[in-house]
Amino acid sequence: MNYFVTAIGTDSGKTLVSSILVEALKADYWKPIQAGFPTDTEEVKKLVSNSITQFHPETHQLKLPASPHAAARFEHLHIQLDDFVEPETTNEIVVEGAGGVLVPINQEDFVIDIAKELEMEIILVANLYLGSINHTLLTVDYLKRNNFNVKGIIFNGDGNPESEQIILKHSGYRPLLHLPKLGKVTPEVIQYWADQLMLSWYE
Ligand SMILES: Nc1ncnc2c1ncn2[C@@H]1O[C@H](COP(=O)(O)OP(=O)(O)OP(=O)(O)O)[C@@H](O)[C@H]1O
Ligand SMILES: C[C@H](N)[C@H](N)CCCCCC(=O)O
Ligand SMILES: [Mg+2]
């Protein structure tokens, strides 16, 4: 199974969560669209320590740290959905989106449409700041209305039981992991949280 990691926004922790997933599953990693530097792939390479994972090149590596539709226009490029061809591998792939679900890649399509085209199972990263319930349930509503197959939700940030409870109630999604605010993120920290994730992965 290939997993598409999305979130309720940008800077939500998708790269951090992708590193944990890659380490836990010994899966490959692919960031189809990178906007800005340093790249997420470089970050994941620093955090993953297993010898099986392959890091597949971005389909579009854009200079501007902006929405892909704008970053592409800035470079006189046009991104289209059929640019995205699943990398050749016999391994599972953890695919990281860019920003949240409705991030435009051109004037018609969105980042989440890549997951639809490639029939990937969604993993949703949800933060727990004040305001994140609304952002999360809007994302959940979109995923449900468009019949996405969702593996589960990973809460990222210091505990907020009231938010977690109401999000789980309305989404019906399985909580895969709750990642607190970490200190220095090292490969050892990633391995620890990869082990935590696997405790309930096959439930
Ligand atoms: N639980 C956490 N504890 C400590 N630092 C975190 C945590 N979650 C995210 N961060 C940090 O916050 C920053 C943004 O996280 P990250 O890069 O994973 O976001 P992202 O969702 O991948 O963003 P983008 O949409 O640009 O891909 C990073 O420096 C990351 O290490
Ligand atoms: C540049 C950033 N780090 C992400 N890769 C792209 C985020 C796009 C967000 C678009 C938006 O929702 O306004
Ligand atoms: Mg990222």
Image (cartoon, helix red, strand yellow):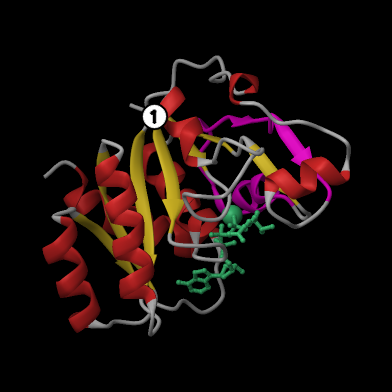
- Relative side of 105 to 178, left or right: right
- Residue furthest front as drawn: 107
Quarter of the picture containing the N terminus is: top left
Q: Position of residue 119 (x, y in %)?
A: 37, 25
Measured as percent of width and height from the top left, residue 79 is found at 70, 31
Horizontal and vertical percent position of residue 116: 41, 29
For label 1, count other residues whose C-alpha is less than 10 Å away and answer few (under 14), some (14-19) or many (20+): some
Residue type highlighted by circle 1: Asn
Residues 6 and 178: in front is: 6
Ligand 3 within 8 angstroms of badge 1 C-beta: no
The span shown in magenta is: 39-63
Q: Which residue is mark 1?
A: 2
Q: Residue furthest right?
A: 75
- Image position, residue 76 (x, y; %): 88, 36
Near-viewer residue (145 or 192): 145
The image quadrant that residue 90 belongs to is top left
Determine the quadrant in which ligand 3 lies. bottom right
Q: Would you say residue 12 sits in the magenta stretch?
A: no
Residue at the spot x=52%, y=33% of the render? 53
Q: Considering only vertical position in the picture, is 110 above or below 178?
A: above
